[in-house]
Image (cartoon, rainbow, N blue to C red):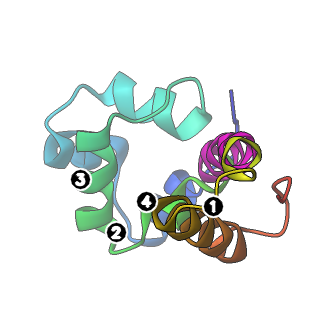
């Protein structure tokens, strides 16, 4: 599980104790500690709540988690591209174009098609 995120630094830079962030999130302080330490991935609800609190995109607050998810999706896109490579329909062409756009938007680290 990824151990690095920037929540503790963001929280401290804004002078917020864990208890205050926990209150804003509607969770126990221990949840904030586990998410900050990387012991727990935030739920989608918490991810959006953190965005509201800190005004940062989730991919910036949880960079390693984002990269891991991105790599999984890009790898699946490569599999799908291989399946579509022999098809010549308009739908297959549109799908391949979208897959290529996904890869282009991806961070440099994932395996590319």
Q: Indicate yes or no whether the magenta region holds residue 44.
A: no
User: Alpha-carbon neighbours of circle 1 within 10 Å: few (<14), some, or many (≥20)?
Assistant: few
Task: Give the distance between the C-alpha atoms of the residues marked 4 and 1, in whole angstroms.
Answer: 52 Å
Q: 73 left or right of 48?
A: right
Q: Residue 11 carries which label?
A: 4
Residue of label 1: 88
Task: Give the distance between the C-alpha atoms of the residues marked 2 and 3, in whole angstroms.
Answer: 9 Å
Q: 1 left or right of 31?
A: right
Q: 70 left or right of 10?
A: right
Task: Give the distance between the C-alpha atoms of the residues marked 2 and 1, in whole angstroms.
Answer: 47 Å
Q: Indicate yes or no whether the magenta region holds residue 79.
A: yes
Q: Residue 2 carries which label?
A: none
Sequence-wise first label, 2 or 1? 2
- State which mark lies toward you, 1 or 3: 1
Along the viewing direction, whichever of 72 and 5 lies nearer the viewer = 72
Q: What element carries label 4?
A: helix
Residue of label 2: 54
Task: Give the distance between the C-alpha atoms of the residues marked 2 and 4, in whole angstroms.
Answer: 8 Å
Q: What element carries label 3?
A: helix
Q: In which quarter of the image is residue 44?
A: top left
Along the viewing direction, whichever of 86 and 51 lies nearer the viewer = 86
Q: Which residue is drawn at 74% across and 50% down?
A: 86
Q: Which residue is drawn at 63% across and 61% down?
A: 88
User: Alpha-carbon neighbours of circle 4 within 10 Å: few (<14), some, or many (≥20)?
Assistant: some
Q: In this view, does 100 lie above or below 39?
A: below
Q: Residue 49 carries which label?
A: 3
């Amino acid at each position: 599980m990824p151990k690095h995120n920037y929540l503790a630094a963001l929280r401290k830079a804004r002078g917020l104790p864990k208890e205050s962030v926990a209150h804003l999130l509607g969770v126990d302080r221990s949840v904030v500690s586990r998410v900050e330490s990387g012991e727990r991935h935030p739920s989608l609800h918490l991810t959006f709540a953190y965005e509201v609190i800190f005004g940062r995109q989730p991919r910036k607050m949880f960079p390693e988690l984002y990269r891991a998810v991105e790599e999984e999706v890009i790898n699946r896109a490569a599999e799908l591209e291989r399946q579509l490579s022999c098809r010549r329909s308009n739908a297959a062409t549109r799908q391949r174009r979208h897959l290529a756009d996904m890869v282009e938007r991806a961070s440099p680290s994932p395996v590319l098609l």
